[in-house]
Image (cartoon, helix red, strand yellow):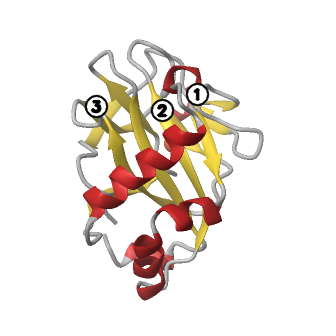
Amino acid sequence: MKLWNYFDIPNWESIRDRVNIMFTNVYPNIDKMKTLTFFPNDMVYQAVPDFKDWLDSQSIEVVGFAVFIFRYNTGDSRLHVDLGNPTTYRFNIPLMNTENSFTEFFDPPWDKMVEGMNESATEDSPHQYWEYGDEGHQIDNFVLNKPAILNVKTPHRVRVTEDKPRVCLTICPASDDQLTRFL
Ligand SMILES: [Fe+2]
């Protein structure tokens, strides 16, 4: 099974722009936002009703929306597995400054794995993660310059290469079946 794939959402750039307006209205200062910020489904659907229509047309039920912000030269996304995520696959929509960052997948030394909270984990979703230098062999990577589905149960990280906050909308589906046909 593939680890990731791009997929087409009609008018995704317009959806991106309106989601950006939505969350910057709520959080005017991106620099003060945490790595992961959840948004109520209703707030997202109000901002982008056409996206809700598209999700319905694809029979994708969304469990939750959140905005991820990764910053340059921080530990925002060290190599990890999304332990508490209910599904294997999620999908992400680029919002800001994603063009010079890489989502990287690794085959790490599993015996050096730590279980618990790294920087991008939450109470509900602890991570399995690896300390710096224990990444092992990189097996794949992609640039989030279009909407993409990705496997979050394979060790992965986001490497940011420029000093701008890298922002994406991350979406958890109700089941993997709703996304795996896009792979
Ligand atoms: Fe992750």
Residue 89 rendering spot, x and y as whole percentages = 48, 61
- Which label is found at residue 101? 3
Residue 31 rendering spot, x and y as whole percentages = 51, 20
Could you tell me how many numbered marks the image carries? 3
Under mark 1, the amino acid is Met
Q: CA distance from mark 3 to mark 2?
A: 12 Å
Residue 83 rendering spot, x and y as whole percentages = 64, 47
- Residue at (66, 57) in percent of width and height: 40
Disc 2 vs disc 1: Cβ atoms closer than 8 Å? yes
Q: Residues within 10 Å of mark 1 (few under 14, many from 20)?
A: few
Residue 153 rendering spot, x and y as whole percentages = 52, 51
Q: CA distance from mark 3 to mark 1?
A: 19 Å
Q: Which residue is mark 1?
A: 33
**Left or right: where does residue 14 sit relative to residue 54?**
left
Label 1: element kind:
loop
Q: Is residue 10 above or below residue 131?
A: below
Quadrant (top left/top right/bottom left/bottom right) for the C terminus: bottom left
Give the mark, 3 or 2, whose residue is nearer the N terminus.
2
Under mark 3, the amino acid is Ser
In this rendering, the label closer to the viewer, 3 or 1: 1
In this rendering, the label closer to the viewer, 3 or 2: 2
Residue 64's image quarter?
A: bottom right
Q: Which residue is mark 2?
A: 69
- Residue at (22, 36) in percent of width and height: 99
Give the mark, 3 or 1, whose residue is nearer the N terminus.
1
Question: Ligand 1 within 8 A of label 2's CB?
Answer: no
Under mark 2, the amino acid is Ile
**Left or right: where does residue 22 sit relative to residue 125?**
left
Q: Residues within 10 Å of mark 2 (few under 14, many from 20)?
A: many
- Residue at (24, 42) in percent of width and height: 143
Residue 13's image quarter?
A: bottom left
